Image: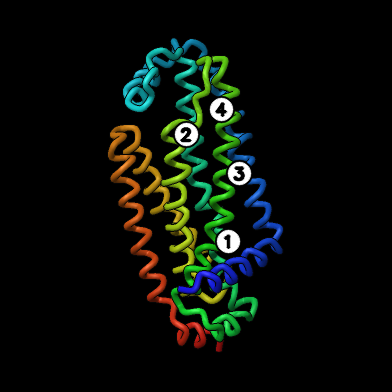
Amino acid sequence: MKWKRLWALSVKDMKDYTKSKYIVFSIIVLPLVIGAIVPLQVMLYSGSFGAGDNNESSVIFMDNVLSRTVDDWEDFTNQAKSTITVGYIVLVLVAMMPIIITSVIAAETIAGERERKTMEALLTTPLTEKEIVTGKLISSFIPSFIATTVAIITFSIVMDIILYPLIGRIFFPDLISIIFLFVVSPIITIIAVEGLILVSTRVSTVRDATQLGGLLLIPLLILIGLQVVLFFYNTILGIVVGPIVLLLIAAGLFKISTSLFKREKALVKLV
């Protein structure tokens, strides 16, 4: 593959995305909402726990789960434990953000080219089918990963401001949030983009691609849920086995999407 050609295609796509106010809103505002405003709700929610006397069952559950991953968990008050628990729930929401953003961006990859009447020009370039799919993947991945990074950094700052009076130290980013940022989130982003590109190659309009792409939310949410369960119940499996399985899924989807995207079929759909 020619990386200069790939990058040129990716830059062209990203310029097209910035013309849409809806996409720009999703990339800029959504990370701030999830990363900052949602954790602020945690502060209000955690205040209802008080000393935790009326939440003995929830505290026992948190002790059984989070004591596996937090070394000084037993030293925290029940209110601190409750706040950290809700913080991890917010972290899962942040991990879901690539799916939301890519559902907006990646649905416009192939189907958008058809709607804008630019597919024929794209197919006449020296780009191979694999390079076209890879270029679309890169252009969808970059803004999603940046938005997720901003959200996790914002989330960590806000959560530490909330937690510092309770535990007297900086808690986020911890090992789990770092792995989510640099390992799980990028792979989930790639899987989401590949799935939506796969859908986009089979339909003629962005609307159809967006609607069918919504069906991908269910298996992707299941993947995120399984990854979270692995982290908390078996940290080694969560760190090693989980990402390997995700990588295999990403590699399989890439092979399928590149094999299904053919110039001849794409040209036929333009007629």
The numbered mark, 2 or 3, whose residue comes first in the sequence reads 3
Label 1 crowd bin: few (<14), some (14–19), many (20+), radius 10 Å: many
Return the residue nearer the eye: 226 or 120.
Answer: 120
The numbered mark, 3 or 4, whose residue comes first in the sequence reads 3
The numbered mark, 3 or 1, whose residue comes first in the sequence reads 3
The numbered mark, 1 or 2, whose residue comes first in the sequence reads 2
Which residue shows up at 35% across the image and 20% down it?
63
Spatial distance from mark 1 to mark 4, Cα to Cα? 29 Å
Which of the 4 quarters of the picture holds residue 41? top right
Q: Which mark is residue 57?
A: none
Label 2 crowd bin: few (<14), some (14–19), many (20+), radius 10 Å: some
Q: Which residue is mark 2?
A: 89
Spatial distance from mark 1 to mark 2, Cα to Cα? 25 Å
Q: Which residue is mark 4?
A: 159
Which of the 4 quarters of the picture holds residue 33? top right
Q: Which mark is residue 105?
A: 1
The numbered mark, 2 or 4, whose residue comes first in the sequence reads 2
Which residue shows up at 53% across the image and 15% down it?
168
Is 255 situated above or below 90? below
Q: Which residue is mark 3?
A: 31
Quadrant assignment for the C terminus: bottom right
Is 112 situated above or below 121? above
Mark 2 against mark 4, which lies toward the viewer? 4
